Image (cartoon, rainbow, N blue to C red):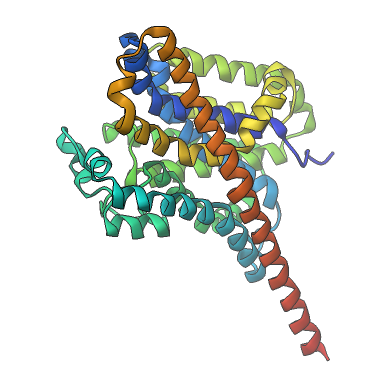
Amino acid sequence: MPKARSIPSLTGVRGVAALWVFMTHFYGLAADILHQPWMLHSLFLFNGFRGVDLFFVLSGFILMHVHEGQFAVLRWHVIRDFFIVRFFRVYPLNTFVLLAMVPLVLLAPGYVAMQRYYTDPSFAYRVHNLSLPGFVQTLLLVQSWTVLKLGEWNIVSWTLSAEVLGYLLFPLLAMGAMRIASPRHALALCAASLALLVMVLFACHHANNNPTGTFGAIRMFFCFCAGILLYRAYHLLPDSMERHASSITLGAVAFIAATLFFPVVPVLDVFGFTALIFGLAYQRGGVDALLRSGPVIWLGRISFSFYLTHYLIIGIISWGMGERLRHLDFVPGLAVTFAIFGFCLLVGMVCYHLVERPSQRLGRRVMQRVEARDAMVAVRGAA
């Protein structure tokens, strides 16, 4: 029996991951507004950056799900169409957000100074934030490809840079995965990829922090490969596996939750994320039902726009209103906290409808026109 073409809960889990990343960027300001210093010591809030690793695993899995079989043999027109669609998936929204920041950078020197402020020598590169070289690097989405620290603009866009690198590698990785005939071998290689990532993180003293830049590309590579191999195993395994899907998803959620009670241990969450995605692919059980519910699906749909804009909004609010907000009483502070969250969702929704979706439609039209032109050339050649 063919696997399902649509897996709604994987859209939902993307929204949950984006929300977790939002929390890790917002909880410092929220703790000040609400006068709740305990929030600064929450392992759940601190580890929200690990949602990025979930994104990377999910990306490899979904790309294999969508393009299954197309890269068994590398063909130029298939690779070209893939790159066209992927370009219009990430570059237009990234460019829109980047250009929207230009007036702020030119007209608000106080904001620029805040973004360039640092106290820890390991963050000394921030002195170059919002620079012209950093703008070019971010525009091209190559900031994760080299060790050059030319300065950040929209800091979260490093993940897009790493993702683009994954897109460039995908045809070769997919072709290699398609040559795996045993689900056990695919799962073993998937686990090995994650184990190598964990070992590298420990060896480089990044097990309990959020390495970005070039190291972010390393995180992407191992998680992306794991997602690709996971899908290959899912494709090869018998349909009878679906009877275990609910237990797998519940076990994955329990594992992730358990790690959040201990420092450093959440570095193992990549295994939980992978198991969660695998279980959800069979669309069974309560976790799947929750993640395919209307509000969660909606959050998943706008998650890319929400993710790419929220950090900028939080930074502007912290710079422009931070001191006043910190003097609010608890109830007004709680209202403001939810208002900031709601505003971030609103901006994400607007960008999704006005920039992200039109860009994707444009990408499909461009691909169709290129294919039509190729067909006409082939007909003329045959004549």
Quick one: quadrant of the C terminus? bottom right
Question: x, y percentage for residue 55?
Answer: 52, 37
93 displayed left or right of 129: right
Q: Percent from the top left, x then y, of residue 111?
A: 27, 41
**Left or right: where 101 falls relative to 134:** right
Is residue 134 shown above or below 379? above
What residue appears at the point 51 percent right and 58 percent down from the top-left corner? 168
331 w.r.t. 314: above or below: above
Q: In which quadrant is the N terminus drawn?
A: top right
Residue at the image point whose x is 64% and y is 30% from the top? 12
Q: In this view, does 269 lie above or below 184?
A: above
In this rendering, position of residue 140 left or right of residue 361: left
Q: Which residue is drawn at 53% across and 26% down?
A: 342
Q: Position of residue 59 (x, y in %)?
A: 57, 43
For the question of whether residue 72 can be seen, the reply is no
What is the quadrant of residue 235 in the picture?
Answer: top right
Quarter where residue 365 is shown: bottom right
Residue 143 position within the rendered picture, expressed as x and y whole percent measured from the top left? 35, 53
